[in-house]
């Protein structure tokens, strides 16, 4: 299982692996916002939590279709399925690898980009915490979407349509946490909701993803 | 010798149609069985069913838990070297030491080349070296000799004979005889009468 994680991480950072694409996309989205909204600090500061979370969410979406599609194309998904390792573990490891190459870099880069959006001083810690707690759910839910669409040609758009509605609760509570943090209000409720969503998806979604993969492996 | 693989009254389907029905055979350890039949008869579907990638429509397959399946595609990552590819599969199957497998499949000189730069035949040799590092008793192979040259086919035949001599078994779908003293099963008599399977599930296949 460690071997699978190391392989996926190594593939992500090798040429053509797509590591950093999501990060650069996040950077561009966030830098474009002041151009579109105008450089007025008050407006930017008010929308900063939502923009940062939306940017992170879309950046996360970019690399989802690679999770299983590449393994399916070169046949390794079939071989993984026949290896003595449960499919649930395979999809969980895949989700973890996706988070380490997407969610974690986004979390680390977010405070730097928040400067561009005039995020209030007190909210930086909450921004990092909200992304740290919330982005694993994005990877796990995204892995489920990728598992559902693995056999489809050009499944990327369908994957986005399937997964984005599932991201709504995480987006709501993640952005709300940062907003409350920025205003100096209590953050317990959105933080607990965010953590609860992440914990529940990590516990349940690998089973759903594994079932979807098994269904897609059948040629019937 | 103990039976490694037993297939009883097996019906397999592809695309919602039964393609083979009533397939019966057993494979003892130390023996190999070659599956033959015209294109499209369902060799791949039968092998995928035995490998556990899809459920049988009817009948039973009793196979050892850890079998090694080699499909048309070798499952190689072009960005990784030959050694990295093989090490990954070895660790996934909980075995150590890929050096013997590299040597057996004549891949030593290529060990540090990225798999993307290999020729089709070299990739296939790497795909077959994967079988050696799985440590599995039963090898299920789908057209293993495709794109191999004559020397490599002979090499492959020797590797399979050694595997059988060690108590393993091999089930091979092929049109080329790799020089094994193996039984042959012609699948033509098992061709299913054309009929659509009922059931809602198939719509999602």
Image (cartoon, coloured by chain):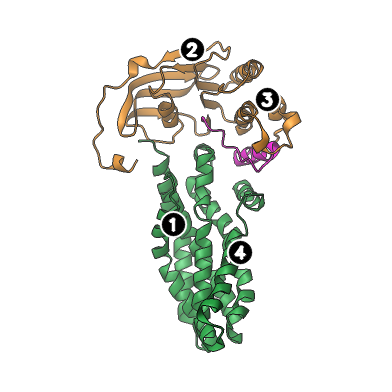
Q: Between disc 4 and disc 1, whose residue precedes? A: 4
Between circles 2 and 3, the one closer to the viewer is 3
Picture disc at residue A138? none
Front residue of B151/B160: it is B151
Residues at circles 2 and 1 in contact by the CB criterion of under 8 Å: no
Look at 44% across and 48% down and name the residue there. Answer: A154
Please state the chain letter of the residue tagged with numbered disc 3 in the rendered image. B
Picture disc at residue A24? 4
Asked if residue A61 is positioned above or below residue B57 in the image, the reply reads below
SS assignment at label 2: strand
Please state the chain letter of the residue tagged with numbered disc 2 in the rendered image. B
* Residue B122, picture quadrant: top right
Q: Quadrant of the C terminus of chain B?
A: top left
User: Which residue is tagged 3?
Assistant: B105
User: Which residue is tagged 2?
Assistant: B183
Q: Looking at the picture, do discs 2 and 4 lie on one chain?
A: no
Q: How many angstroms separate mark 4 from mark 3 (CA)? A: 43 Å
Between circles 1 and 3, the one closer to the viewer is 3
Coordinates of residue B162 in the picture (x, y in percent) = 63, 18
Chain A appears what colour?
Answer: green
- Answer left or right for B20 relative to B50: left
Residues at circles 2 and 4 in contact by the CB criterion of under 8 Å: no
Residues at circles 4 and 1 in contact by the CB criterion of under 8 Å: no
SS assignment at label 1: helix
User: Which residue is tagged 1?
Assistant: A205
Look at 64% across and 32% down and name the residue there. Answer: B133
Please state the chain letter of the residue tagged with numbered disc 4 in the rendered image. A
The span shown in magenta is: B71-96
Q: How many angstroms separate mark 2 from mark 3 (CA)? A: 24 Å
């Amino acid at each position: 299982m460690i071997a699978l994680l190391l392989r996926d991480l190594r593939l992500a950072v090798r040429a053509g692996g797509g590591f950093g694409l999501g990060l650069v996309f996040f950077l561009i989205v966030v830098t474009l916002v002041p151009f579109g909204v105008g450089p007025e600090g008050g407006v930017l500061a008010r929308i900063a939590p939502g923009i940062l979370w939306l940017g992170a969410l879309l950046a996360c979406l970019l690399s989802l279709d690679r999770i299983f599609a590449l393994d399916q194309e070169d046949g390794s998904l079939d071989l993984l399925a026949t290896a003595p390792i449960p499919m649930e573990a395979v999809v969980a490891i895949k989700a973890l690898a996706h988070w380490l190459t997407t969610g974690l870099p986004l979390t680390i880069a977010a405070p730097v980009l928040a400067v561009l959006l005039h995020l209030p001083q007190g909210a930086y810690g909450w921004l990092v915490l909200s992304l740290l707690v919330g982005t694993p759910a994005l990877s796990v839910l995204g892995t489920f979407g990728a598992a559902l669409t693995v056999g489809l040609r050009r499944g990327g758009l369908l994957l986005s349509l399937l997964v984005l509605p599932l991201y709504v609760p995480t987006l709501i509570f993640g952005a709300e946490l940062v907003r409350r943090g920025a205003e100096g209000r209590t953050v317990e409720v959105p933080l607990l909701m965010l953590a609860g969503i992440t914990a529940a998806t990590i516990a349940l979604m690998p089973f759903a993803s594994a079932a979807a993969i098994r269904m897609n492996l059948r040629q019937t | 010798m103990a039976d490694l693989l037993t297939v009883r009254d097996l019906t397999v389907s592809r695309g919602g149609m039964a393609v083979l029905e009533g397939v019966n055979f057993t494979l003892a350890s130390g023996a190999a069985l070659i599956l033959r039949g015209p294109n499209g008869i369902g060799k791949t579907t039968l092998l995928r069913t035995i490998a556990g990638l899809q459920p049988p429509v009817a009948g039973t397959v009793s196979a050892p838990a850890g079998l090694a399946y080699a499909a048309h595609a070798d499952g190689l990552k072009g960005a990784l070297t030959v050694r990295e590819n093989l090490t990954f599969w070895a660790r996934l199957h909980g075995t150590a030491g890929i050096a013997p497998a590299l040597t057996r499949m004549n891949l030593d000189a290529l060990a540090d080349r990225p798999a993307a730069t290999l020729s089709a035949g070299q990739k296939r040799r790497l795909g077959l070296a994967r079988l050696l590092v799985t440590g599995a008793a039963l090898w299920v192979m789908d057209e293993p000799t495709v794109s191999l040259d004559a020397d490599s086919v002979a090499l492959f035949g020797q590797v399979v004979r050694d595997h059988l001599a060690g108590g393993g078994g091999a089930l091979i779908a092929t049109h080329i005889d790799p020089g094994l003293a193996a039984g042959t099963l012609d699948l033509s008599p098992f061709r299913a009468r054309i009929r659509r399977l009922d059931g809602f599930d198939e719509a999602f296949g």
